[in-house]
Amino acid sequence: RVRAEEAGVGDRVRFEATPAAGDVGTGFDLVTMFDCLHDMGDPVGAARKVREMLAPDATWMIVEPAAGDSVEDNLNPVGRAYYGFSTLLCTPASLSQEVGLALGAQAGEARIREVVEQAGFTRFRRVAETPFNIVFEARP
């Protein structure tokens, strides 16, 4: 918030941290999630909530761990570490919540796309990637 003020955009930028089912309003141009969708017990429900929050031609930016769609795609040093994190943290966290879909840190693009489409988004694409994360854009 301080940096937004310093950059002169504080009057048109809003930062909110909320539970997935929280109500922060509607009409947002951009909603972001960083390394968390795969941890949610009900990622489809959370995605539906984001869909409700967005303006008609807005963007949901989803940053998720870099993962392929199959185990074989993830047999590399980063993938192996992420499977460890997923086993110890991500999957149990999801299973402890309502629905308990348990995507885990190695959900992969196809599974994230499926969640997004089930929530009513019509456009989904990979927009950037690093060895550690993939950035997706979803639009209504």
Image: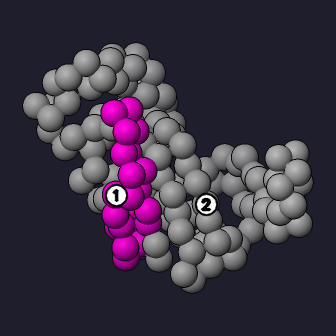
Which residue lies most toward the front here?
7
Magenta region, residue range: 116-138
Which sits in the foreground, 71 or 18?
Answer: 71
- Quarter of the figure with residue 64: top left
Q: Are marks 2 and 1 in contact (CB under 8 Å)?
A: no
Element class at badge 2? strand
Residue behind mark 2: 31
Question: Three-letter amino acid code at disc 1?
Answer: Arg
Q: Is residue 115 visible?
A: no
Q: Which mark is residue 126?
A: 1
Does the magenta segment cover residue 48?
no
Q: Which residue is rendered at x = 34% and y = 52% of the image?
A: 112
Which sits in the foreground, 127 or 74?
Answer: 127
How far apart are the two marked residues, 2 and 1, measured between alpha carbons? 16 Å
Give residue 138's position: percent from left, percent from top.
44, 66
> Of circles 2 and 1, which is in front?
1
Image height of 74 relative to 89, above or below: below
